Image (tube, helix red, strand yellow):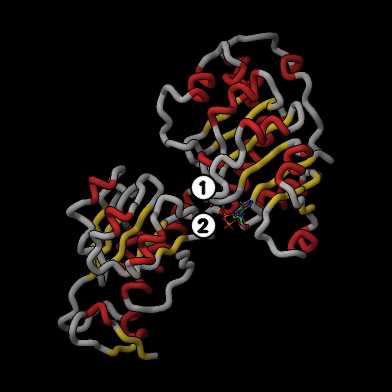
Amino acid sequence: MLVAFPAWGDTTEIISAEFLYNSEARPVGMSRFQVVIADFITDAMAPEREILGDVATIVSLGASREDELIGHVEQADALMIYHNITISERIITRLQKCKLLIRCGVGYDNVDCVAARARGIPVANVPDYGTEEVADSAIGLMLALTRGIAFLNRRLQRQAGEWNYMQAVPLRRLRGRVFGIIGLGRIGTAAALRAKALGMDVAFYDPYVRDGYDKALGVRRVEKFEELLQQVFVLSLHCPLTDETRHIVDARALALMPSGSYLVNTSRGATVDTAAIPEAIRRGPLAGAGLDVLPGEPPPPDHPLVVAWRDPNDPCHDRVILNPHAAFYSEEGLLDIRVKAARTVRRALFGEPIRNVVN
Ligand code: NAD
């Protein structure tokens, strides 16, 4: 197979891809590529070195703000981005020869994909590293809430109430109750299969899912978002953060949910208006909420939900579970992201077709 490598400058070289992948050596005169990891990775980068080390210099910046990237990314041939940083047009316009922005994860709302496209830079993600972990976490949050596990543990631990189940009354049997999904994509589907295994009646709202997928999966499509809200026992978000889904669950939406229902969010924090949750728990209809994600991570200490969750005198203390955007994480999943992202970078460096381009 012959491929062209415009990245090598004026002399366009044609070389066998097989040679490049199988050989330690690089053609004479080939400059090393530069790959920059913007954030999150602070270790010795063993997976990235294994896949890219023979052709690229890899730099990890461990940044959390765009300012920290200035002066370090301009000459990057590829920029690897996790979820601790936002990449706006301001940074994208500085990139002189970048062949790929890779979001090492699923959601790419922290990258200005439009600005990248305008500059001819593809943005790709790694869609399949943690599907099962996130679905497991959503179901885990649901079980911890609906079985009273977190509530009872929290109360016993601080010696509130009697040492018996009565504190958690009333809990409801899950079988037959509606597990409502917003966004029946990879993770939503994996969560649907798990909820079905628990005997739940799985319904979803997703205007972009093709007709018939619901039949194949054995779940119910609900055409109107409000209809889904009115019937859920548990509402679980699995949509991306877009202009359409920002605050898709707000005070108005929460008010439509049945009394004693639960909210689970493992998608993106800003899909829910989290400031509306404390009142929905204090006055109903929510019996509890489990959130892996918040609009700002870490949240400001004065965020109304965080304040209520920290206050032992507020019902949110026992009825809200917060996690630090951990649903994606397992050792296996983390290695998957790094390996898959690095392989995609390698393809981009060598001008090969790139998988999972999102812009
Ligand atoms: P996916 O693209 O496979 O599925 C997203 C689904 O949402 C699609 O079916 C899409 O049609 C649907 N959707 C889009 N707009 C919608 C709308 N307005 N209303 C209803 N549905 C809508 O993505 P995925 O792999 O299932 O991941 C889903 C989201 O989970 C990601 O976008 C990411 O933000 C989040 N995520 C979180 C973690 C974590 O650690 N908490 C990890 C991975 C992914």
Looking at the image, how many numbered discs can be counted on the residues?
2
Residue lying at 62% horizontally and 15% vertically, measured from the top left: 156
Quadrant of the rendered image containing residue 225: top right
Residue lying at 24% horizontally and 50% vertically, measured from the top left: 69
Q: Position of residue 223 (x, y in %)?
A: 75, 52
- Note whether 42 is above or below 171 in the view shown: below
Task: Inspect the image, locate mark 1, and give the three-letter code of the amino acid beneath it.
Answer: Phe
**Secondary structure type for disc 2:** loop
Residue lying at 49% horizontally and 41% vertically, measured from the top left: 326
* Mark with earlier residue (2, 1): 2
Disc sitting over residue 129 in the figure: 2
Query: Which of the two residues, 173 or 74, is positioned nearer the viewer here?
Result: 74
| In the image, farthest residue toward the left | 29
261 lies left or right of 271: right
Q: Position of residue 277 (x, y in %)?
A: 59, 27
Query: Which of the two residues, 95 or 37, is positioned nearer the viewer here?
Result: 95
**Secondary structure type for disc 1:** loop
62 lies left or right of 254: left
In the rendered structure, are the residues bearing label 2 and label 1 in contact, judged by CB atoms less than 8 Å apart?
A: yes
Residue lying at 33% horizontally and 61% vertically, measured from the top left: 48
Estimate the spatial distance between the alpha carbons at disc 2 and disc 1, rounded to whole Å: 8 Å
Quadrant of the rendered image containing residue 278: top right
Task: Inspect the image, locate mark 2, and give the three-letter code of the amino acid beneath it.
Answer: Tyr
Quadrant where the C terminus is found in the figure: bottom left
Indicate if the residue with disc 1 has its beta carbon within 8 Å of ligand 1: yes
